[in-house]
Amino acid sequence: MIVSHFNSDLYCIGIHNPVRERSVEQIYRMIRERLKKPFFLSSGQELTITVSVGVAEYPEAAQSALELINCAEIVMFKAKGAGKDSMQYFDVPILDEFLQKIDIENKLKEAIFHENFVMYFQPQYHVEDKKLRGVEALIRWKDDDGQMISPAVFIPIAEKNGTIVSIGTWVIEESIRIYAGWKAKYHASLILSINVSAIQYKRPNFVSKLMAIVEKYGVEPSEVELEITESILIDDFVEMTNKLAILKDYGFRISLDDFGTGYSSLSYLKGLPINTLKIDKSFIDTVISDSNTKIITEAIIYMVKKLGYETVAEGVETQEQYEYLKSIECDNIQGYFLGKPMPAKDVEELLK
Ligand code: C2E
Ligand code: CA
Ligand code: CA
């Protein structure tokens, strides 16, 4: 057995012919056993550490030592991602997932350079009269092969590597530019909802950039609704809510997206400077079939309305869901039932 220190908190253990008490599992158990006991710093401070282990075996995983180490490292990150303090064996699906991610990451950099994105828009309707309330801007990435890549795949990657900031700025400018065109042509006054990622929102120049864009295209801030998720509030609640208040003072509308998927505490809602709350699709999916979901959805809508916020139900797919949401006085709906995300020219058909 060879133990070596690679860098910072990274170690490599090479085991030749792992058998009996020197088997991989046994060694892992011994490491964990030792790390269970806390360490004490000279200041008296107690320190506990966890260990994430990735295992790659010769010859199944790879043929050379360097490749084995790479494979072990890939699955080690997988173990780390899965809540740390665990061991993960190398297998082909993990490698494929990793390679696909790298591939998307590389292509994404190209796509940003060439601006290979298009904006789609999904209509939102008032429940009462089915009149158009506004549209949500949703990005689409057109791959070189003409394939559309879903934002659900690449936005999380862009958030991790920071490219979301430039993508997000492009989204804001492009959707406001298109919206300004509709305004001029159809004298339409709608609400344009734009998704904003936490990293993008946290940038110090976020507000000034946004202001510069609305001014450039002659759009009123009150026509723009920023869709944020509660993840922006987690690190620094006070500073981040202050920023929301500044945006609201400028006249922007704020919408809390995906409500019901995270902590979704009703107690923090009361002090939040928002206008709209979007009830996540996962509630709408089961609201007809599951009585508990029904109770929760009704309670949320009742309370949110009392707090003075508008409600939007997401992912409404059926007439039955629509009728039900109408009966419990949800204000607006968005979903395949009344309209899928569509290119800008199709929105023009609606505006005509
Ligand atoms: P989201 O903000 O929750 O957007 C709603 C997603 O649900 C969209 O998927 C939409 O196409 C889909 N959807 C709407 N109605 C229905 C329905 O009735 N049934 C079903 N099955 N799906 C429905 P999409 O466009 O793939 O976007 C996925 C996510 O990607 C978005 O979720 C949002 O979090 C993110 N995203 C999209 N565009 C942007 C963007 O410009 N910036 C940022 N930061 N994130 C974006
Ligand atoms: Ca959204
Ligand atoms: Ca959502």
Image (cartoon, grey):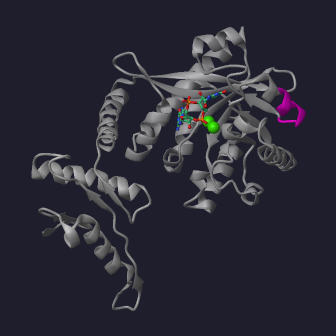
> In the rendered structure, does residue 278 fall within the stretch colored magenta?
no
Q: In which quarter of the image is residue 213?
A: top right
Residue at the image position 37 percent from the left and 91 percent from the top: 43
From the viewer's perspective, is 133 left or right of 147? right
Is 327 part of what is drawn in magenta? yes
Q: Main secondary structure of the magenta part?
A: helix
Question: Which quadrant of the figure has residue 316?
Answer: top right
Q: Where is residue 223 in the image (x, y as percent from the top left)?
A: 70, 30
Above or below — where is 46 with respect to 333? below
Q: Is residue 60 toward the left or the right of residue 192 in the image? A: left
Residue 145 spot, x, y in % from top left: 34, 16
Task: Residue 304: give x, y in percent of width and height.
Answer: 81, 47
Range covered by the magenta-colored residues: 323-330
Q: Tell me the quarter of the image containing the N terminus.
A: bottom left
How many numbered circles does the render carry?
0
Report which quarter residue 211 is drawn in: top right
Residue at image point 33% right, 54% down: 77
Give the quadrant of the C terminus: top right
- Residue 177 location (% of width, % of height): 56, 22
Between residues 1 and 309, which one lies in front from this camera angle? 1
Q: Quadrant of ligand 2?
A: top right
Query: Can you say whether 323 is above or below 236 in the image?
Result: above
Residue at 46% over, 41% down: 156
